[in-house]
Amino acid sequence: MLDGEVSFLSVMSGRTSPANPGSIIRRDTLLRVGLYDPQVDSWDDFDMWLRILHAGGKMAYQRQPLVRYRVHGDNVSLRHLYYMERAARVLDKVEARMQLTSEEAAALAARRKRVTFVVETLRGKEAIGRRDWPQARRHFEYCANESPTLKLRAVLLALRWFPWILPAAMGAQNSIRPD
């Protein structure tokens, strides 16, 4: 997504999103903010962008595609829950290690809320797959409290009265529209 100048706030809020595969980063910038963190096993590019931008670094993007990204079954980004849990860890790291302005802290809180919603949705789906109805209900109740949509209310209703239909419904939905 490209919408305006790349800044800490624009990346945190999701208005801009630098692309790691085609990155060119000055060596002195990497040395100044620290290299890639080996403790971050996914979302390491996001972690790096935030550290560079928060330290006053500048970024720009090229609208022309410069790389091709091969998608295969072992891509970490295809393991959705794992991938989003790692996003939450990076947000925790940002909060713990960076001195944020009130505007940056608010953008972080909003991003964390969106990531947590996705994580809870994915955990709920996994619980349905395991037929763990109480856990699924707990995850989807969180989601319904955050965003009371008709679809979430229907999932909660099904979890209360006839949960056994949900795995089949999810299977049908996934065969029509892959996540």
Image (cartoon, helix red, strand yellow):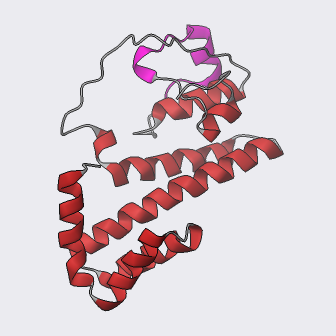
Q: Position of residue 127 (x, y in %)?
A: 30, 72
Answer with the quarter of the image where residue 124 lies. Answer: bottom left
Q: Is 7 within the magenta?
A: no
Q: Residue at 70% of width from left, 45% of height from top?
A: 107
Q: Is residue 15 above or below residue 6?
A: below
* Horizontal arrangement in the rendering, residue 147 relative to residue 108 (left or right): left
* Horizontal arrangement in the rendering, residue 48 relative to residue 13 (left or right): left
Q: Residue at 79% of width from left, 43% of height from top?
A: 103
Q: Position of residue 97 (x, y in %)?
A: 67, 42
Answer with the quarter of the image where residue 74 lies. Answer: top left
Q: Position of residue 42 (x, y in %)?
A: 41, 39
Q: Residue at 38% of width from left, 47% of height from top?
A: 83
Q: Nearer the viewer, residue 85 or 62?
A: 62
User: Can you name the residue that lies furthest to the bottom here?
Assistant: 161
Q: Nearer the viewer, residue 66 or 152?
A: 152
Q: Nearer the viewer, residue 118 or 160?
A: 160
Q: Is residue 63 above or below residue 55?
A: above
Q: How many marks?
A: 0
Q: Position of residue 163 (x, y in %)?
A: 27, 83
* Horizontal arrangement in the rendering, residue 140 relative to residue 129 (left or right): right
User: Can you name the residue that lies furthest to the right here?
Assistant: 102
Q: Residue at 68% of width from left, 21% of height from top?
A: 5
User: Can you name the residue that lies furthest to the front here?
Assistant: 150
> What stretch of residues is rendered in magenta?
20-37
* Horizontal arrangement in the rendering, residue 47 relative to residue 132 (left or right): right
